Image (cartoon, helix red, strand yellow):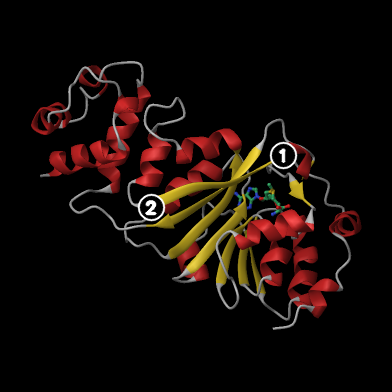
Amino acid sequence: MSNEGLSALPPLREVIAKHGLSASKALGQNFLFDGQLLDRIARVPGSLAGETVFEVGPGPGGLTRALLGAGANVVAVERDRRCLPALDELNAASGGRLRVISGDALEVDAAAEAGAGAHIVANLPYNVGTALLVGWLGSEVWPPWWRSLTLMFQKEVAERIVAAPGSSAYGRLAVLAQWRSTARLAFTVHRSAFVPPPKVMSAVVHIVPAAQPEGVRFADLERITAAAFGQRRKMLRQSLKGVAGALDALETLGIDPQRRAETLSVTDFVAIARTIRA
Ligand code: SAM
């Protein structure tokens, strides 16, 4: 693999000017131009030499350049057709290591497009970021088709993904992200790094699949955590009333129904889901 073609590319700002890629708010477009920062994101999953990466929203291709520069083959899905000519140029410069799917990431079959073992890396459009994450975490097959997730979120969302019990950020996202994966906040990114700058700070989260606890289904955990954290100020005996078998499960497990959802560990939620199913 040679990166000569990539290093001969014009600066991203020129690419944007040439192709008229003014940022669209509706498409959640906040572009990154800082090559060092982009390389740092591309290093989070570990060595990408010869690996396949699935990227959502390459836009003008800043992060895509870093991924290709790290030796990856990239399959990217982009909704904004204006970006396609710039991405064609990037594909040519990389020696054909970039394949772009023009479409909506919520509708594309990423597993089929990228193949088993791909890493997912993205500076996500904020309006669809959580929905995509829950879709990837909810894979029926485990370990899933993806090897790791390296995702830029609003910092507040990133904190909810990695939160520990007892904190105000702890909730449904933390449980869904942590019950069969390890999730860590890799680093925060200042809002000024983006063009245009968003209103809030951002952070990169790194998630790697772990062993799945036996006898537990994602759908049950989703139901229980939605009910428990949907009324997070209420005691469990109130918030879990509508989930069949949940109050009995608390009794079986010796979990005090007067507790509130945020005091339960991820393991407690897993145990409730398993007991309901038993
Ligand atoms: N990767 C670029 C970077 O880091 O500079 C752009 C990131 S920007 C935050 C999000 C990108 O996702 C935009 O290019 C936007 O057009 C694209 N996008 C928005 N919604 C999308 C969707 N549903 N499916 C695919 N791409 C989408």
| Residue matched to label 2 | 181
Question: Residue, x 8% and y 32% (percent of image)?
Answer: 252
Q: Quadrant of residue 13?
A: bottom right
In depth, the one of 179 and 62 nearer the eye is 179
Residue 180 horizontal side relative to residue 156, left or right: left
Residue 129 horizontal side relative to residue 211, left or right: right
In depth, the one of 228 and 169 nearer the eye is 169
Where is residue 126 drawn, in percent x and y?
A: 61, 40
In depth, the one of 67 and 108 nearer the eye is 67
Q: Amino acid at mark 2?
A: Ser
Q: Is residue 75 above or below residue 271?
A: below
Q: Is residue 59 visible?
A: no
Q: Is residue 257 visible?
A: yes
Q: Quadrant of residue 168?
A: top left
Q: Amino acid at mark 1?
A: His
Query: CA gap, disc 1 to disc 2?
Result: 27 Å
